[in-house]
Every structure is written in structure tokens, then in C-alpha cells.
Amino acid sequence: MMENSPKENTQLFSKSERPIDRTPFKSESSISEGKQPCCGELKVFLCALSFVYFAKALSEGYLKSTITQIERRFEIPSSLIGVIDGSFEIGNLLVITFVSYFGAKLHRPKIIGTGCLIMGVGTLLIAMPHFFMGHYSYEKFSPSNSTITISPCLRDLNEKISLSVMERSQSNINTGCETETRTSMWVYVFLGNLLRGIGETPIQPLGITYIDDHASEDNAAFYIGCVQTVAIIGPIFGFLLGSLCAKLYVDIGFVNLDNLAITPKDTQWVGAWWLGYLIAGALSLIAAVPFWFLPKSLMKPVSRKDSISSSEKSKFIVENPKEYHIHYQEKVTMLEMARDFLPSLKRLFGNPVYFLYLCASTVQFNSLFGMFTYKPKYIEQQYGQSSSKTNFVIGLINIPAVAFGIFSGGLIMKKFRISVFGASKLYLASSFFGYLLLLSLFAMGCDNSDVAGLTVSYQGTRQVSYYERALFSSCNSGCMCSKTEWDPICGENGITYASACLAGCQTSTGSGKNTIFYNCTCVGVTESKSGNSSGMVGRCEKDDECSKMFLYFLIISVITSYTLSVGGIPGYILLLRSIKPHFKSFALGIYTLAIRVFAGIPAPIYFGLLIDTTCLKWGSKRCGYRGACRLYDSYGFRYIYLGLTVLLGTISIFLSIAMLFVLKRKSVSNTENLTNDNEATLESTSSKKEHHTNNDYISETPYWPGKETQL
């Protein structure tokens, strides 16, 4: 029997003889205060943390909405976009372990406030390249002036005007090439996102555990659900902000918009991507202020009698009172904390429930990170939607479903007081039905756009395979065309041509986005004409059937997002209830670290690499290097994007099933042990009634202040 202090013995003897009805002891601080704790400061912290979650989620949502804009502005492939997106996780990786381990023992609110400042500076840094780069230039046919018309198809090599224009253009290209080789401005976006990752690090592990430590057992899950819901509202505003900025031209205020030859639906269009980062950075800086005025810790509420979470926790955790006193009552030095790091990590990974949940979540987040990062690109390329409309749809329809799903998961856990085993079943069910719904999206894609020389021949028949020389045909053989040029026009036959030159167009009228081309010999081939066929600037629209498919895609996508999100809070509760109280911050930190390292960093990169393999037409930089992709193979894009997502989701489901079996076996085993112990204790109590006080203490599971895990 462990020794008790005189104060604790006095408390023990003053309680009732019935151990089952015993009210848990208050902490020493509560006893000394002699009053119930006030929850005002906790609510202030909850509001401040919710605003921080909103700010960081808005920044993350806005980054996802500008993926295609950044790709086009810096002329980089999807794989490099994945590296930029993964830099956020790299920033987390650098400091997450130390912040989650040492931060739990220091002033948590001030550490969160410092992180917000770093996050705000990083977000502002992302927007800086716009102010140091020149005006955005794009491939476009433009006549020299209103009186001299340059033919897109240069048949006569002696056309001096045309050649002089080409020479001047080449001179400008060479000048631009020299500038281009000196700058790689996307690195600033990479570094800014890296700082965002460093600043975001303490928010989740320290913020969630701060609430868990100081909220009552009934309210903790609900509070966490509220915070996570607010975190999902952030991306809604992030994508809506991205939709607004995508409508504005990148150099708005510096160029005459009437002279633009492209529209927001053009694959070369770049919106004002930098504007939203200035707004998001300011919000992050403001969010840091309240945390500098909050205390290091709050008074703990009195635990509920016969707590459901306590009984559930006792099935999976065997705690040692002496170990608790060492962690919570002794003031240890930083060196002693460092020495305890590896043993703590070993004990954490020795928990099979925690380890299997960690593996299942990591694989699942690989699929979710990859799917969410490239979802705007998928909608744009698969269904022919503009960046602005894509961001608007995701922000207004898709993300609210995720928010409602997360909130529903927390509400279900609170209302039905679901056990740990029930939480694991709910987590598994949401994953299973969510990925099952994703399978139906394979049938909701669109055919490739008809692009001459890429997806169809110049005669209008389907292309078997793509090769560069297919861009040239007998109808444009007399033209001086470049195979790298991408300045699409839509012929009156419904086929898109890579450029007016490759369409064999002889004359043009108008300027900018109102330019119309005439006498296009390649357009006349499919129309069985000798010529006199026209085309206009821009790609041809998708057919009506594709619009219907887009509507079906949105409906299934919303249902899938809700279904997968319902398992979010049950997963969190499962994580927190399967570990010892003093490991909560450390366990959440390691969990976050694993998600960042093995999902957040690699998933966008290998998703991007595989998506790049489906590109049919690459853009070209001024120096002749490969730029961003202009046209994707719709079939290949769909199979890689959805197939990889479903494959990873299936693996996570099998890992979740294994975790469920471990939980069930452990629950049954520990329940039998507890039953045997209680029967032996009751026998001992009835045979020694005269020593009821001592037997009363033995019959109860050892308790000490703060033993409850709060969840």
C-alpha cells in the first residue's frame, strides 16, 4: 500500500463507506481556494484559439486556391508546386518534436502567440515576389498596329514587316532570358510557406491539450469539435477570397485591362494571387495579441462522479501514482526532460492502439492531402471550369460539408457518450463509406477536349498517341509555326488549335480578346471546304454532357467530404483516451510530426509527379525551357488522381480494422481483470468490516489529484 500524507489520510477517512459513490478528490489548488474554478479565462482562450485556427486555415485554403495561379506565374510543373506546398510541413518538421515536448512544460499561450507572429511574417513573405518581378507576359498573337496586319501564317519569307517583327520579338526574348536566368522568385514562396509551417507548429498540440487539461470532461470533446469546426470555416473564406482574386488580373492597376488578349478561362490567365496573402498575413499578426495576456495554467474543474471517460480510460491505461507525482509535482530541469525524451518515445510507440492509429491516419492523410491539393486543378482540367469558379464552388459547397461533418462527429461523441471502442468503430465506418463513394467518381469524368494534333487529328479523328510532329499537317505545312507555342483558338468546327498559325489562318481582325481569324486552312479541312473558315481566340467550350457530369461530381464530392469528416473527432478522442495524461502533448506532437513528414511533405510531390505524366502540351519559357502544363489527358489525369486516392484510403481502412481488433481484445482482457479484482476486494471487505476505512481505500482504484484524462 502506498504511503499517504496526513492531509490525504484525513480526506480518506472523512469520506463515505461506499467506494462506488465516492466523489473524486479536488486538486490541492482547488481545496486551498475553497471555490469553484471560473471558466472565463478558458473561454477567452477558446475564442483566441478559434481565431488562430481560422487565420491559419484561411491561409492554407488560400494557398490551395492559388496553386494553378502560382504554377502559371512562375512557369513551374506540378511536381515543383508539390515541393512548395510541402514546405509548410517541412517547417513543422524542424520544430514540432521540441515544441510539443518542451512546450507542454512551459508557458503554452505565449508560445502559441510567438508562433502566430512567425506565421504572419511568413504569409506576407509569400506575396513579396510580385513586387520584385516584372509584368506578367504570355504567349499571344498581336498585330504590330492597326494599319499593318501580320498574317498568323507566314507563307512569304520575303515579308519584311513580319520578319522585322519576329526579329524584334526574338531580341525581347533574349533580354527576358537574361533576366529569367538571374531570378527564381518561387523560392520566396517556398521560404514564406516554410515560415508558416514553423509558426503553426505549437498551435495544435499545445492549444488542444490546454483545452483538454482545463475543460470539464463533458465539455472537452465539444470544445475541441468547435475549434476544429472553426478551422474548417477558415478555408471557406480562403477559397472565396481566392475566387475573388482569381477574377482580378495579376498586374491590376499597372496595365490597361482593355488590351488583354486572354480571359479568366484561358489556361494562361493569372489572377491577383498575391493580394490574398497580404490579407491573410495581417490576420495572423492580429491573432497573436490575446495569447500574451493569458496565464500559464487555469484552475481545473471538479471531475464528474463515475465519469464515463474515466471508466473507459481505465480499460486501456494502467497508471502509477508515483509516476504521476514525478511528472506533475516535481520541478525538473531541461536536462532531465531531455534525458526522458527517448524513454517517453519508446513507451509511446509501445502502445499498440496509438501506433496503429498513427499508421492508419498517416496513410489516410496521404490520400487527403494529395486529393485536396490538386482538386482545383482537377476541376479546371477535367470539367473546363475557370479558377475563379472552381475556388468559389470548393469554398461555398465542399468545405462547409467538411465543417458540418467534423461538428457532427464531436456532437455525436458528446450526446451519446460513445466509448473508446465505439469511437474506433465510428472512425472506421466513416473511412469505409467515404472511400466507397469516391469510387463512383470514376464514372463522372469528361472526354478530352478536341485539340488538333494532340487529342484528335486535323481531320477530326481520335488521336491514338501523342507525338510532337502531329501538330504539323499538310494544311499548315506552308506556315512558319512553332511547335512550342500555345495560343489556342477555337475553330468554327468545334476543334481547338494550339495557335492561329497551326490552324493555317491567313488574316485577322480586331485586337486582344476580340481578335477573329479568317481563311484558316486547317479548319476548312474538317468542314470539307477549300478555305474561308474562321476561328476566335480561346479554347472551345466543353459540351453540355460535361456540365452535367460536373454537377454529379459536386453532389458526390459533398457527400464524400461529409462522410470522411465525421470520423475526425472520434479519431482525436481515441488518440487522447488511449494514452496516459502526461503523454498527451507529446503524443499529439508525434502524431502531428508523422502526418507532416510522411503525408504532408511527400503526398503533394508524388501526386504532382504522377499528374505531370499526363500532360499533353507543355508551355515554354522565354529561354526555351519547359514551363507549366497547358493541356492534360483527361482520362489519365482522372485515373491517377482518383485511383491513387482510393488506393491509399483502402490501405488505411485495413490498418483501422487491425486497430479495432486490438482494442476489442484489450478491452475484454482488462474487463476480466477488473472484474476479478473487484470480486476479491468485496470478499476482503465483507470479512473485515471492523477495518472498513482501510478496506475502503483498497477497494478503489488508486486516485491522486489530476488523475483524470479529462476526455
Image (cartoon, rainbow, N blue to C red):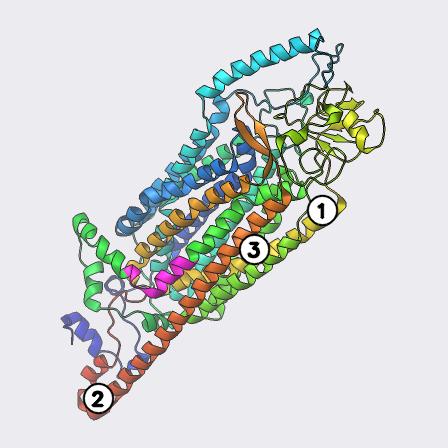
| Label 2 or label 3, whichever comes before in sequence order | 3
461 or 115, which lies in front? 461
Q: Residue type at mark 3?
A: Ser
Furthest residue to the bottom? Answer: 687
Q: Residue type at mark 2?
A: Ser
Which residue is disc 3 drawn over? Answer: 561
Whether tag 2 and tag 3 are in contact, CB under 8 A, the answer is no
| Numbered circle sitting on residue 546 | 1
- Residue 117, percent from left and from top: 38, 37
- Residue 419 at least partly seen: no
90 or 363, which lies in front? 363
Give residue 447's quadrant in the image.
Answer: top right
Which residue is disc 2 drawn over? Answer: 684
| Placement of 326 over or under 85, stated as above or below | below
Per the image, label 1 sits on a secondary structure element best described as helix
Q: Residue type at mark 1?
A: Cys
Q: Would you call the spot at circle 3 few (<14 residues within 10 Å), some (14-19), or many (20 or more)?
A: many
- Direction from residue 154 to residue 297 in the image, left or right: left
- Residue 559, percent from left and from top: 60, 58
123 or 510, which lies in front? 510
| Label 1 or label 2, whichever comes before in sequence order | 1
For the N terminus, the image quarter is: bottom left
Per the image, label 3 sits on a secondary structure element best described as helix
The residue mark sitting in front, 2 or 3, is 3
Residue 351 part of the magenta segment: yes
Q: Would you call the spot at circle 2 few (<14 residues within 10 Å), some (14-19), or many (20 or more)?
A: some
Q: Magenta segment, which residues?
A: 348-360
- Residue 10, percent from left and from top: 18, 75
